[in-house]
Amino acid sequence: MSGHDHPKAIGGAIMDPLMKLLLAIFGISLVVMLYRFFAGIGPVSNMTDGYAWGIWEPINVVVFTGIGAGAYSVGLLCYLLNNGRYHPFVRPAVLLGAIAYSLGGSSIIIALGRYWNAYLLGAVPFWNLNSVLLEVAVCVISYVCVLWVEVLPAVMDGAARSGSPGFAAWGKKWGPRLASAMPYIIALAIVLPTMHQSSLGGLMLIAGPKLHPLWHTGLLPFLALVSCLSMGYGAVVVLTTVLKYAWKAKHDQELFADMSKVNGGLLFLFAAARVGELAVHGKLKYLAVPDFHLFFFVLEMALFLVPAFMFFSSKVQRDRGRLFGAALMTVAAGALWRVDTYLTAFNGGPGWNYWPSLGEVAVTVGMAALGMAVFVLVSRLFPVVVVEDVHQTSVGAGRVRAAASR
Amino acid sequence: MQISRRSLLKGAAAAGAAVALTGKAEAREKMEPRPDAVGMLYDSTKCVGCRACVTKCKEANGLPYDRGNGAIYDAPADLSSTTKNIIKVASSGEKSAFMKQQCMHCVDPSCVSVCMMGALHKEGEGTRKIDGEKKGTGIVLYDKNTCVGCRYCQIACAYVVPKFEWNAAFPLIVKCELCRHRGDPKQEGPLAVANPACCEVCPREAVIYGKREDLLAEAKRRIAADPQRYNGQVYGEREGGGTQVLYLAGAGIKFEELGLPKLPEESSAHFSESVSHAPYLHGITPIALFATAAFVIRRNKKKEEAEHHGEGT
């Protein structure tokens, strides 16, 4: 085996200050969530009959899974278009996806009023196939399972290399078996996100009378699909850059630049489809109304177009910091479009106003903190991240062995 | 690299084109009012705002009185999880008019279209067989046993009708079910399937219950008999695909002023379902996509293994 491009467990102390901080933040949200199960959703949130989803659905589900789409977008490049160069991105992206989707899914349980009936989603005869949310629910649950299966090769890899004989035998036995099934699992990991990511846009098709015309369009599913790919590529660049500074993760600027050019194309495609739709349906007149919807529209367009141009500039492509900034902007662009579609452009009806409560924010932030904690934990214990040079981190290498034998 | 980027963009463009094309080709059929559909007709010009219907509704549905803000009698300000029916006064300038709000029992309801497991459903047309439900009345009913409390119905309803019990640990969705539980099988005609308390108690027949087609004919008869009295339209005949609760408003009063949204003739459910279903081509697309992806990935993997010798995953 050539050790050249292989991921390594990071090792190191599990309970470092960062981990303690993340768990403390999650602890606060845990209190809010427990209280919600006794008192109902009203006391912990500012949700009303007009704004029935608050920020939990738009951010915890729609934005989190957009970020988690890195697994989908990198998978497309690496496996379907057979660009093996992108392999180092796959494991971190898949782990990010598995975590983000699991958090999105579990946030929903907190938000569901009658969560104890959710088991019925497994009963096919009860399915209302006209419900876009049913498609999202069933598809996301399946995809969470697929994503964790995709994480397993890293775990088995770690097991096979571990010092414990039983664990190593398990890894050596099941690793190759899983590897032969992987093409079918990866194919599922491409079909399922294609379906539910477009549905995350399709969810708001029905809200036509309540959604601002600049956001309501038959293209919602298509726009959501394009935006998840672009958020995914952005999130992978952001993640890998952060990992470089945190753990000296391998960092290939040229690879980043090439992937970002794909992202630039997607951003242009999104902006063109959006503006084209407005022109075709005679909705450009709404751009002449200076209200806060126009502010958000212009902000969105800037967040989509500025990084799109940046990605094609050779100056940005060579500069790690600028490319990171542009990638961060693409994540923000997709996130803002999603939040606008679900919240700011949504009119809950006369007399209804909404601003998130501290409890709602605590749950959203706590879920994000938990996500980071799980990412750090798994990367420390199992080979997920491709590290730049093993010899430079000889102290870490000792820990790797220690961690792997756990 | 050049090739893969181009092909990715090509793929995305093709997907977009496919969505646009099939969206046109495969719209689902328009839903027509059921011949035996029942509903209500509210005539704003006859209502005197006595609110007897609000109180009677609470009695008939076992809902608590709302005596918030120091009120000495039931005085809700809006529809809520304890108020399924309400009378409001709408005023613009010197004119004012009464307005009754409750579930519209749409011909093609958004709440039914979005409900994941058919908790909100047209009577007898849900996913689950429920004893005593007869298909054809078009009444939108709630089945708490299949509701997960996702509140998509609240997002979808253009009339902001479904309400949620925000302060309950085990909450329900609450909305008017046309007093179906007060129907008397021994009676003839519409009273056999439902008997809305609000219509029964109204002293001025400002709101009446009956078969939708009879109510629509009655509304048009009233307009024809006294054209000066009305604004000339029947709200709910076509708005949002039609509703089973119909409205008449006084001359010079627009329905929007009464709080009824201006809706296109196409129902939101029709639009949403047509656009959402089209790219699936009756389920062929996901299967074809899976088969293609699995084939390509397997081939690529074999190629890679041949080149690198045993470098998996």
Image (cartoon, coloured by chain):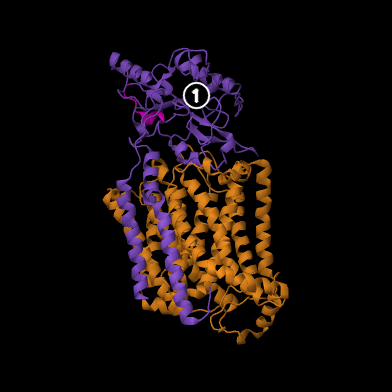
Chain colours: A orange, B purple
Is residue A329 among what the camera can see?
A: no
Pinpoint the chain carrying mark 1. B
Q: Position of residue A269 (x, y in %)?
A: 34, 62
Tell me if residue B37 comes above or below residue A120 in the rendering: above
Q: Residue at x 32, y 55 (%)?
A: B18
Front position in the image: A230 or A343: A230
Tell me if residue B306 comes above or below residue A93 in the rendering: below
Q: Position of residue A53 (x, y in %)?
A: 52, 45
Front position in the image: B47 or A237: A237
Q: Is residue B230 left or right of residue A197?
A: left
Instruction: Name the residue tied to disc 1.
Output: B178
Q: Position of residue A307 (x, y in %)?
A: 40, 68
Residue A392 drawn in magenta? no
Say which quadrant the N terminus of chain B sits in: bottom left
Count of number-bearing discs:
1
Front position in the image: A264 or A288: A264
The range drawn in magenta is: B251-259
Q: Amino acid at mark 1?
A: Leu
Q: Is residue A53 left or right of residue B299?
A: right
Label 1: few (<14), some (14–19) or many (≥20) C-alpha neighbours in 10 Å: many
